[in-house]
Image (cartoon, rainbow, N blue to C red):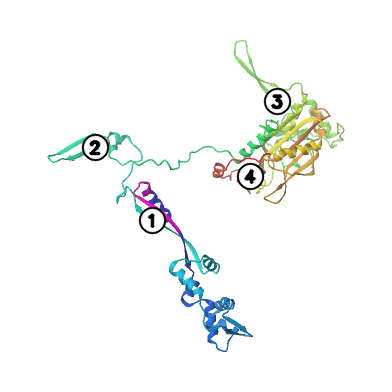
Amino acid sequence: DFTTIKSALDRLGSREMITHKQIDREEANLTPEAEEIAAQGSHEAKVFEVVRQAVDGLKIADLPGIVGKESAKVGQGKAFKEGWIKKDKDLLKATTSAIHDASQDQLRTIQQTKTHPDSKVLSDLRKRKLITMQKVITFEIMKGPKFSREFVKEETDLTADMLATWVTIKIYSIMRMLIYTHRGAWKTVKLKPYNFNAMGAPTMSGALHPLNKVRHEFRQIFFEMGFEEMPTNRYVETGFWNFDALFVPQQHPARDLQDTFYIADPPVADRPRADPVEKTEQLADGSNFSHKSQDHPQQDYERYWNNIKEVHEKGKYGSIGYRYPYKEEESLKLVLRTHTTAVSTYMLYKLAANPRPARYFSIDRVFRNETVDATHLAEFHQVEGVIADFGLALGGLIGFMEVFFAKMGIHGLRFKPAYNPYTEPSLEIFGYHAGLKKWVEIGNSGMFRPEMLEPMGLPKDMRVYGWGLSLERPTMIKYGVSNIRELLGHKVDLNFVESNPAVRLEKD
C-alpha cells in the first residue's frame, strides 16, 4: 500500500541510494451508467432518435416503453432543453434532422484520458453522478549518489564489541600475499549518518489538568484584585458551619439525604471551637516539646453557638428568625461540604476578632448528591469570593461583578433577583454566550444577611459581598467539552490531559 511504498522510498532516500519525487493527480472514472452512455449514447440522444424515426410524431405515453423509464425521464427534459424535440399536444416531434451528442463525446474523452480539459464539464458530470474522482499518487525515482543494488546494513551505535574485535585483512601484492591484523571492526562497518532534521522522540512528562489551568487563571485574577486565598483543606464540615451559621434552617430541602452526603462514621462532631495550633517549646534539658493550643482564645465560640441558636429559634438582631425548635444533634452532623461558603463563614468569624476591610477567595471541591449526567456530577469545583467593608451597597456589588467578569472577557452582564437563605438582596448573574447565541447563568451573588454576620460579632455597619460560580463550566467552554464526565472523573482520557493547550482568559 501507499504507506509501505513511501516508507521504503524514504528509507532508501535517507541513505542517498535514490532520489524521488511524489506526483499527485486526480483521475476521473466512469460509473456503470456513464460506461453505457459512452457506448450507446446519452439518454437525450436516445429520446431524439426514436422521436426522429416517428415521422408523424411519437405519443408521450409510448416513450418509456421504447427507451426505458430512466432514459425517458432524464432524456426527455434534456432533449427539450437542447431544442431537439418539441411537444405537439400529446405527441413529441423532432425539430432537427441531426444532433451532436456532447455528453457521449465528453465521457469518451474521459474514458480515454481519465480527465477533461474543461473543469466545468467535470463538475457537471460529477453532479449527474456519471463520474467519480480518485486521487492517484505516483513516484518519479532516480538514482542517488550512493546508488547500489544491494542494501548495506548501517550500524546506528558504536559498541564495545566493535572496538575490541580483531579484524584480518588480506593484501595481495605482485610478489606475495601479506596478512595484516589489527584491532577495531568499527573501521570497516557502515555507520548510519546522523539526521539532524529528524524530530526528537517525545519525552514523557507530567501535564496539568485543564481544570488546574483554568483554576490558575482565576487565581491570578483574584490576586491582581487584592484578594487573599482561604484555606479549603476541610472537605468534611459540620451542619453548623455548612448550614446553621449561614442562616439555613434545619428543615431546608438542601439538608435532605437526597441532596447532601452525610458521614456515617463518625456521624457527629463536637461543638464549634478554635482550631488547634501546633506550638514547639524548649524544655530545661534542651529538647523540644510540641503540643497543640487553641488559636484566637479571645473569641467566644460558646457565645457564637448560642447566638446562632437564638437567631434560628426566636430571632435576633432585628430578625424574627424561623421560629422552630433548634436541634443540636442536627447541627453537629458531619457532611461533605456542599459549598465553600462554609469556609467563608469561618474566615468571617475569625475576622470578627479584628474587624477590618478584607477580600477572600477560594477555589476547591464541593459535593452534592445529584444525579450524574452530561452537565452534573456529584462533585465539582466552586469559585467563591467575599469582600468585607464598611458602607457597602448593592450598586457596588453590581459594579464589582462587571469588573471581575470583564477580566475573563465577559461583558454586558445581566442581573436577575434571586433567593438565597444567607444573602439579601440576591442576584443571579447572566452573560451572553456567542456560541449558543443565548444568555446563560454564569454565577450567583448577594449581600450576606445580618442574621449571618452579627452573631459573629461583626459591626452592624460592616457589609459583605459574596458570589460564586463553578470552575467546570468555563473550562468546558474553553476546551469545547460537551460532557462533564470527560473532564472530571474516571472516564477522563489521559491523552486529552497531556495534549490540551494552555488557556488564557481574555483580559482588559
**Is residue 302 at all visible to an observer of this figure?**
yes
Give the farthest residue toward the left: 175
Q: Is residue 379 magenta?
A: no
Give the farthest residue toward the top: 284
For disc 4, the marked residue is 478
Q: Nearer the viewer, residue 224 or 415?
A: 224
- Mark 1 or 3 closer to N-term? 1
For disc 1, the marked residue is 140
Single out the mark in the foreground, 3 or 2.
2
Single out the mark in the foreground, 4 or 1.
1
Amino acid bearing label 1: Glu
Calculate the distance from the C-alpha at mark 1 to the C-alpha at mark 2: 42 Å
Calculate the distance from the C-alpha at mark 1 to the C-alpha at mark 3: 79 Å
User: Is 250 left, or right, of 379 in this rendering?
Assistant: right
- Mark 4 or 1 closer to N-term? 1
Residue located at (32% from left, 47% from top)? 146
For disc 2, the marked residue is 167
